[in-house]
Image: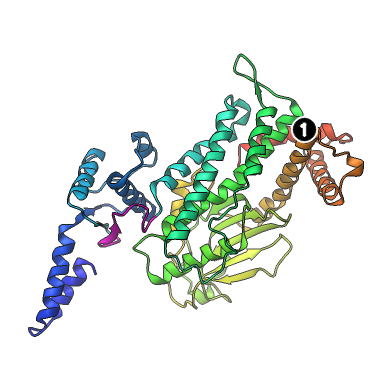
Amino acid sequence: MTLEEIDKKIKEMTYNDYDELNHLLMEKERILKRIHFHFEEQISVSHIQLFAKVFKCFINGPYVLDEQYLTQLQLVLPKECKDVDALKKKAEEATSTSIDLFFVTTPDYKDLEYTTAFNKQIPDMCISIVLLSLQDNYQSIRDFSKQKDIYTLVDSMISSYKLLNSSIGYNLFYENYNLDGNHFKEKVAPNITHIDFLRRLRSTIYMACDKKEDGNLSVDKKLSVFAKYQILDFVFQCRYLSFWSCLLDIMSFPGLSKAESDVLNKVAGWFLCNLTNPYVYHLICESNPLNKLRSVDMRESSDNTTRIKVYLMKNDDEVPYLVRFDLPHKGVPYVHLNIQHNEENEENEHFRLSHNVIDESLDHVFENLSESLKTFNFNCSFLYHSPVAKDREIIQRMPEYTAMMDLATYVECIYLELDLNPNVLPDCIKETLDRSVKIIKEMVENELETTIEELPDLYIYADMILEEELKNI
């Protein structure tokens, strides 16, 4: 109960309720003795969660938070703390008096209750720090041609991947999320970490990108293409973990209503059940506001009922997926995921996330997640209006990326001098290679209006296109 609820109940009591009155007064005193933080300005849910993580971190450790992290994460402080040092003193006070809870109040939320226990209730600080480091890596990859320290970049990406996947899995395993009763086939994290894949990725990129003494890169042109697409392959998988980091922050927010919590838990359940190591090519948060002038049963897609879009491919097929986070609209009167399997498929799958909704009570259900993605996954989340034509454009490019990555793996095998004679390849590999070559030839010929006869030429032309593509990932 909040202080307001306690005071209201006390006022409504009769003189005969002595036991109940004493209980409420004791509860009020218990709450007042604990630390309270007040934010006078509106603050997003993701920033409230960040503040709670930082304070818990100061109380418990073992992380030593660098000032640079707090500056880059844009920590917002309450009126009780003029700076980070004041917040640290509050943490010392909580530690010395064995305070087990603290409360946060904002203009939108009253007396949000947080436990001071380490790694309880909300994701730990490690997830936010790793997510921040990934944003720097994504930016470095966009300027790959000028990247001198490729070794540090690749090692940082791999470390971030492992830490983020395990930290998310830890939170999912130990916290009490009701993920719609789904069974996850013994999965305890969004992705499965393949040690051999990570080792091979690291070693082969090292071989492809060798430093000269002057600090510049000395790179075989064909292997350069391979290295870039291997890294891009890995970036697309890291993007999935970036998405999960933001989702967990919102799922664990103590101010959620039961209806909001149910929706987000079912979102997490669907992704955990249906996807492992997917490639997330693009993630869009709708910039245009929802049209609230029309009633729920009259709303259509043109009223911007789709709030978030995730464009992805499963790692075991070549079919593009577009997952839309949709608010209730005409014909589908409940919050749902709209899952499109390819651009021609008009019969999309609707995965129900709520009961039927006839009012505006869940119009905001994806706002907090969208805000978190834009704020803390800023190098992977795009904010603009995405009509159907834009969807088709993105979905059309996804198989081209996949073809490039498949071809890069083949180049790697040639470089490592494995026995992969194109004339005697296993059918499954030959089919993948043929499909990739066909897609890439069409792509480069459309771009350059030239005829590609030899496979090695393909690498060179693909590299020219890739330099432009990397700037838009």
Task: Decide: few, some or many residues near mark 1? Use Cα within 10 Å; few <14, some 14-19, many ≥20.
Answer: few
Query: Is residue 125 magenta-colored?
Result: no
Here the colouring is: rainbow
At a point 61% along the width and 57% down the height, the residue shown is 387
Residue 463 vs 320, above or below: the answer is above
Residue 223 position within the rendered picture, expressed as x and y whole percent measured from the top left:
73, 30
Q: Residue furthest left?
A: 15
Q: Is residue 383 visible?
A: no
Amino acid type of the residue that numbered disc 1 sits on in the rendered structure = Leu
Q: Nearer the viewer, residue 430 or 299?
A: 430
Q: Is residue 121 visible?
A: yes
Residue 96 position within the rendered picture, expressed as x and y whole percent measured from the top left:
18, 48
**Residue 316 image-quadrant placement:** bottom right
Tell me: 78 left or right of 365: left
* Residue stretch in magenta: 108-122
Q: Nearer the viewer, residue 227 or 342?
A: 227
Residue 51 vs 388, above or below: the answer is above
Q: Residue furthest top?
A: 214
Number of numbered discs overlaid on the protein picture: 1
Magenta span: predominant SS is loop
**Residue 140 image-quadrant placement:** top right
Tell me: 78 left or right of 473: left
At a point 72% along the width and 33% down the height, the residue shown is 225
Q: Residue furthest right?
A: 423
- Mark 1 lies on a secondary structure that is loop
Q: Which quadrant of the figure contains the N terminus?
A: bottom left
Provide the residue designation for mark 1.
416
Residue 131 position within the rendered picture, expressed as x and y whole percent measured from the top left:
47, 44
